[in-house]
Image: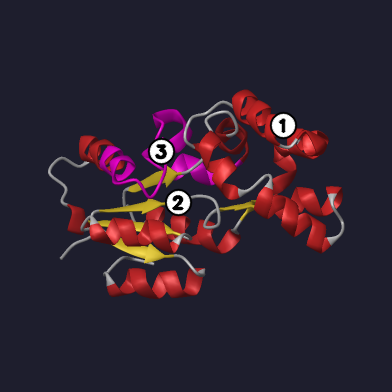
Amino acid sequence: MTIKAVVFDFGGVLIDWNREYLYKQLIPDETERRWFLDNVCKMEWVVQQDGGQTIEEGTAELVARHPEHEALIRAFYARWPEMVAGVLEEGVALVDRLDAAGVPLFGLTNWSAETFPYAWERFDVLRKFREIVVSGRVGLVKPDPQIFALMRAEIERHLPGIQPNELVFIDDSLKNAQTATALGWHGIHYTGALETETKLRALNLPV
């Protein structure tokens, strides 16, 4: 068996994005902050924008549901860059080693089409990928198998005839990694660079 391409998720693997970075400033009390992030600006809401809903629409809907929290809700995207601390160096080092060895690399990320350009302009590691499928641009989010099908179609344009078992997919979401595995890919749940490196070596990849 030969792995012919590796697909990376970005947030939590290569890019250090966390709602807490902003909301620790806005809601210092941990209990209050946890309640707000679990019940108002929750991840299910974020995924709507990652799936193609505009920030304007998503914000208006949430403000209508929680008018008492309008200022905190509007801060989410108005101050979104404050949730991005930079790159995760160990993940980037994996990309660099695979790239240096000539392994074709691709990106598959749940990310709003409106905020992705911020990352693209700032993080050089993203230019190592031959193609990037951004959920907000295609209107699908992981773990929907359809977005994996779109990713595979993009890969096939570069590597005609590639089979699912010749693909590795790395994601910090267990559910996303499991979906890749169910589709015949080698899904790796990213819990740290060392563990991922071990799994890549077991697949005979040059890391």
Amino acid found under the numbered disc labelled 2:
Asp
Q: Callout 2: helix, strand or loop?
A: loop
In front of the other: 32 or 171: 32
In front of the other: 111 or 100: 111
Q: Is residue 137 above or below residue 95?
A: above
Q: Is residue 99 above or below residue 130?
A: below
Calculate the distance from the C-alpha at mark 1 to the C-alpha at mark 3.
32 Å
Question: What residue is pinned by disc 3?
Answer: 132
Q: Callout 3: helix, strand or loop?
A: strand
Amino acid found under the numbered disc labelled 3:
Ile
Residue 130 picture location, percent across and down? 36, 39
Residue 9: which disc? 2
Q: Is residue 96 magenta?
A: no
Residue segment shown in magenta:
123-150
Q: Is residue 201 above or below residue 58?
A: below
Determine if residue 49 is in view: yes
* Image quarter in which the N terminus is found: bottom left
Calculate the distance from the C-alpha at mark 3 to the C-alpha at mark 2.
10 Å
Among the 4 quarters of the image, the one containing residue 169: bottom left
Residue 128 picture location, percent across and down? 44, 44
Q: Callout 1: helix, strand or loop?
A: helix
* Image quarter in which the C terminus is found: bottom left
In front of the other: 145 or 104: 145
What residue is rendered at 48% in x and 60% in y?
172
Among the 4 quarters of the image, the one containing residue 161: top left
- From the image, state whether disc 1 or disc 3 is nearer to you: 1
Circles 1 and 3: CB distance less than 8 Å? no
Residue 205: which disc? none
Question: What residue is pinned by disc 1?
Answer: 63
Find the residue positioned furthest to the left.
161
